[in-house]
Image: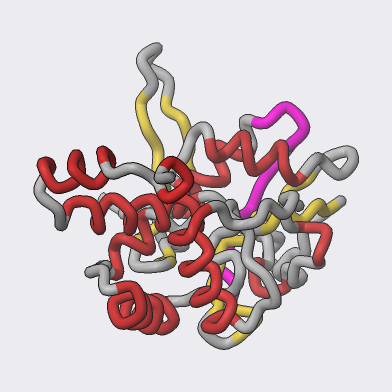
Amino acid sequence: MYRVMDRVRRRVDGEIEYLGRTDFQVKIRGFRIEPGEIEARLSEHADVREAVVVAREDAPGERRLVAYYLADEPASVEALKAHLAERLPEYMVPAAYVWMEAYPRTPNGKTDRRALPAPGSDAFAARGYEAPAGETEEAVAAIWADLLGVERVGRHDNFFQLGGNSLLVTRLVFRIGREMDVELSVSDVFEKPELSLLAQHLLDAQLAQFDPSQIQELLALPRAADVG
């Protein structure tokens, strides 16, 4: 027997579906990922003829998935990302999508993954800015802005897409524990990288520290505006 390193699956109709190569496995944010599985799902999009997904580290400590696709014309980055988000977990959805008319090739005719270009600004999904809502989101946003060196952070921003990495996650957990007095784990950040989701998790953790009867008493207290 010869291990060919191809990854396939048998469909319910008995046909064998090719999912890509297993020797391109990468590790992003603690998760082991098969790029071939992402490529197969992206190729299912009506506007995509072929896809290649690689892990790039264009800046030190900033490793992210980038998808390259062949198509007659550029597709909507938002549409491609939404297509994958419906079929894959968040950590497997590439951060950037680069349209290409042809892939660079090695001397033996295979796709030269090392020669694929760095993604430009138009390869990333544009998201409208929405200001943090509530004290918890505002507090977390301030910590993010300081750690990541960005001017502002919206409630739907993703920690890793803003430049976060494993080292910064550790610092984030420490800062939140010190400044907000809430215990947070590294895995919590990886599972809830969006500001609003992480803030809600922190709020739930804060409420969990109280006895249910105490929460009811707090809710029953009259507001300052009602006193008088």
Q: Position of residue 167 (x, y in %)?
A: 40, 83
Near-viewer residue (98 or 213): 213
Near-viewer residue (211 or 175): 211
Q: Check the image and report above or below for 202 versus 75.
A: below
Count of numbered labels shown in the rendering: 0
Viewer can see residue 94: no
Q: Position of residue 26 (x, y in %)?
A: 43, 65
Q: Residue furthest bottom?
A: 60
**On the picture, is 187 further left or further right than 59?**
left
Q: Position of residue 98 (x, y in %)?
A: 76, 56
Q: Which residue is located at x 58 percent, y 57 percent?
A: 132
Q: Residue furthest right?
A: 73
**On the picture, is 135 further left or further right than 182?**
right
Q: Residue furthest top?
A: 13
Q: Which residue is located at x 37 percent, y 63 percent?
A: 189
Q: Check the image and report above or below for 170 versus 224.
A: below
- Quarter containing the C terminus: top left
Q: Which residue is located at x 46 percent, y 40 percent?
A: 88
Q: Which residue is located at x 10 percent, y 49 percent?
A: 211
Near-viewer residue (22 or 83): 83
**On the picture, is 135 further left or further right than 52?**
left
- Is residue 46 rendered magenta in the image? yes
Q: Quadrant of residue 131?
A: bottom right
Near-viewer residue (228 or 2): 228
**On the picture, is 216 further left or further right than 136?**
left
- Is residue 223 rendered magenta in the image? no
Q: Position of residue 53 (x, y in %)?
A: 59, 56
Magenta stretch in the rendered image: 45-56
Q: Check the image and report above or below for 44 versus 104.
A: above
Viewer can see residue 136: yes
Q: What colouring style does the render use?
A: secondary structure
